[in-house]
Amino acid sequence: MTWQALSADTRPVGRTHHAFGTRLRLNRLSDRGDGRLMIVPLDHSITDGPIVSGDSINGLVGALVEAGVDAVVLHKGAARSVDPGHFARTSLIVHLSASTKHAPDPDAKYLVASVEAAMRLGADAVSVHVNMGSRHEAGQIADLANVAELCDRWNLPLLAMMYARGPRINNTTDPALVAHAATIAADLGADLVKVSYPGTAQDLAALVRGCPIPVVVAGGPPVDDRAALLDRVGAVIGAGAAGVAIGRNVFRSPDPRSLAGDIVHAVHGRVAVAA
């Protein structure tokens, strides 16, 4: 599914027909017109603790904007610490879910912000995290469905971050599980879905062909090999995905601006050819 098809007002994708406001915000997310996305999630702080020191979240976002990223993901409080001027050049996705790594079940995500709060912040989209297979899966799926309904009401795009994680999950990147997670997002009304890389480019291409909404691939665990990371980004785009969402590998880099710029080039500087 291409971004252009998603944005078209005549194509029933995700939530039946996208209203003008939803299409307008979707176009802001990918304003280069190539249908691709380089997103930098910065929502890890509630889970893991501070990702930057002091008030330097504003400096980090500024560096990412200079690198040309399409969007950043922030919790509502962090967003208030960022210069609004940055969002004239990149999009704001407000993350609505959270949990900490210290919880009895770290995979049990729950809502900590509302669609209305994101709208008040001027968000271009919101995101919700669901761990398929968690002991508390039911609440997460219900939250996703409820948020999708509110996003439909307010014409706000929804990015569903879908993972296979839980006591019965042995392989979080199993292609069948990744495809199942993506299907949940599409069936419940998300506009975009973020998933783990499902093993091979061929597996990803098959997932993209079968998913009715654009697929964004997560960056995965931290890696030190820049070339290997960029090769994976190229494989993701070559498989037909809409783009990547890479957080830890960017903000933990010694030079986030430089690495983000290289990823932006890999996403927007290549022609996607579905396998």
Image: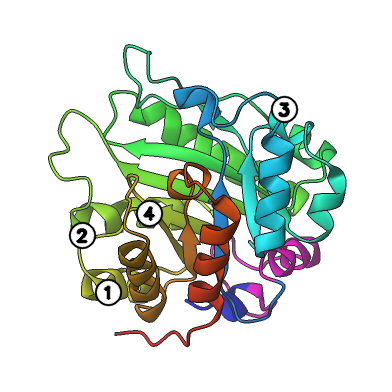
Q: Which mark is residue 273?
A: none
Q: Is residue 84 above or below residue 197?
A: above
Circle nearer the viewer, 3 or 1: 3
The structure residue drawn at horizontal position 54% and vertical position 31%, both measured from the top left corner, is 51
| Residue contact between numbered discs 2 and 4, judged by CB atoms under 8 Å | no
What residue occupies the far front of the structure in this picture?
254
Identify the residue under disc 4.
195
CA gap, disc 3 to disc 1? Answer: 42 Å
Q: Quadrant of residue 187?
A: bottom left
Q: Residues within 10 Å of mark 4 (few under 14, many from 20)?
A: many
Residue beneath disc 2 = 175
Residue 12 shows up from this direction: yes
C-alpha span from label 3 to label 2: 40 Å
Disc 2 from disc 1: Cα separation: 9 Å
Instruction: Give the percent coordinates (x, y) of residue 134.
Output: 29, 29
3 vs 2, front mark:
3
Q: Secondary structure at mark 2?
A: helix
What amino acid is labelled 2 in the image?
Answer: Pro
In the picture, which quadrant includes the C terminus?
Answer: bottom left
Q: Read off the residue under disc 1.
A: 206
